[in-house]
Image (tube, rainbow, N blue to C red):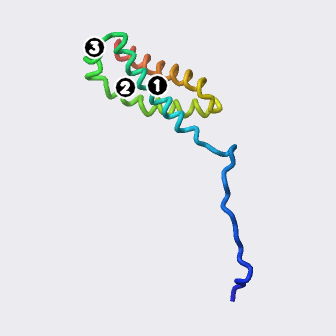
Amino acid sequence: MRNSSQPLLTQADTLSDTEYTAWSLPGGIIGFVSWLLALGFPFLMYGSNTLFFFLYTWPFFLALMPVAVVVGVALHSLLARRLLLSCIATLFGVGLMFGVLFLWLMS
C-alpha cells in the first residue's frame, strides 16, 4: 500500500527573462519586409518593364522569400536582438541576394 499521507507537489519550471527566446518573430517580420522592399526595387528602377522580366523568373524570386525570412531571424538572433542593427543588416543581405540573382538572370 502506498503512502498517501505525504503527497509530493512539484512546480513546473518557469522560463526566466534570460531564457526567453521570442526573437524569431521580429526577425521573421524584418526578413519578410526586406524581401518585399527588394522585390519592389526593380519596379522603381526599371518601371513597368519589370513585369515582363518577372513573367518567367518569378519562381526564383519567390524562392528567396523563405531564405530572406531565415536570414532575418538569424541576423536578429546573432546581433543580440538589436532591432535597428538587425534591420540594416537584413536589408543589406536580402538586397544583395536579390541583386546577385537579378544580375545573374539579366546576363
Percent across and percent down for residue 52 are: 25, 17
Label 1: element kind: helix
Residue tagged by mark 3? 48
Give neighbour class at mark 1: few <14, some 14-19, many 20+ (Cα, 10 Å). Answer: many
Q: Earlier in the sequence, mark 3 or mark 2?
A: 3
Residue type for callout 2: Phe
Q: In which quarter of the view is residue 105 placed?
A: top left
In percent of the image, x 65 and y 32: which residue is there? Answer: 80
CA distance separating discs 3 and 2: 17 Å
Residue type for callout 3: Ser
Q: In which quarter of the view is residue 3 placed?
A: bottom right
- Quarter of the image where the N terminus is located: bottom right
Q: Earlier in the sequence, mark 1 or mark 2?
A: 1
- Answer left or right for 39 relative to 90: left
Of all residues, the one furthest to the top in this rendering is 46
Q: Please tell me whether residue 70 is drawn above or below residue 36 in the rendered image.
A: below
Q: Please tell me whether residue 22 is drawn above or below residue 82 in the rendered image.
A: below
Percent across and percent down for residue 101 are: 40, 20
Residue tagged by mark 2? 61
